[in-house]
Image: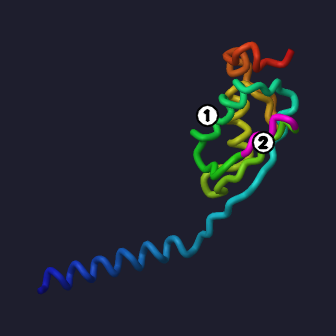
Amino acid sequence: MRTKIIALFAATIFLTFAVSVNAGYKHEVKTATIDISDNMICHVSVGIIEKKLKRAKGIVSFEIDRNKKKITVRYDDAKTNLEKIEKVLTKAGFKANDKDADMMGYDSLPDCCKTK
């Protein structure tokens, strides 16, 4: 009986602490549009971008518009921000908004993905 009371008391304290910690901060999902118009956007590059964004922490969803050469990204602002997402793209070899592509990333892209 005593063990049950101690276990119940410990569980109550744990739950109270867990609720109070999470109550103070509300995660917000933000949306950003990233301009990739300086890049050649072929099917291969779309696959590379998708792979990188799927692995990136904090991204909720994304949509790549090949015609407009834009990526719309929804992300959890507690886990990432626009600058980090741009860095994921630039490290992969793509220009993102006003951030230049990382040359090592660009050199590793297949020729079809490189700006002619």
- Tell whether 40 sits left or right of 13: right
Q: Residue furthest left?
A: 1
Q: Which residues are magenta?
A: 63-67
Q: Quadrant of the N terminus?
A: bottom left
Q: Is residue 105 left or right of residue 65?
A: left
Residue under the point 71% across and 33% down: 89
Q: Position of residue 31 (x, y in %)?
A: 75, 55
Give the spatial CA distance, label 1 vs label 2: 14 Å
Crowding near the residue tagged with mark 1, few <14, some 14–19, many ≥20 C-alpha atoms within 10 Å: few
Q: Is residue 101 above or below residue 69?
A: above
Mark 2, residue position: 71
* Front-lying residue, 26 or 42: 42
Residue drawn at x 87%, y 32% is 37
Label 2 environment density (alpha carbons within 10 Å; few <14, some 14–19, many ≥20)? some
Specify the amino acid type for callout 1.
Lys
Locate residue 21, reporting x and y percent: 50, 72
Which color mode does the image show? rainbow
Give the number of the disc on residue 51. 1
- The residue that appears at 66% across and 29% down in the rendered structure is 48
> Does the CB distance between marks 1 and 2 fall below 8 Å?
no
Q: Upstream in the sequence, badge 1 or badge 2?
A: 1
Give the residue at x 61% y 50%. Answer: 58
| Vertical comparison of 2 with 21: above or below | below
Q: Nearer the viewer, residue 11 or 52?
A: 52
What SS does tag 2 mark? Answer: strand
Whether residue 33 is visible here, answered yes or no, is: yes
Which part of the image, by quadrant, shows the C terminus? Answer: top right
Q: Position of residue 109 (x, y in %)?
A: 70, 18
Callout 1 secondary element? helix
Q: Is residue 98 visible?
A: no
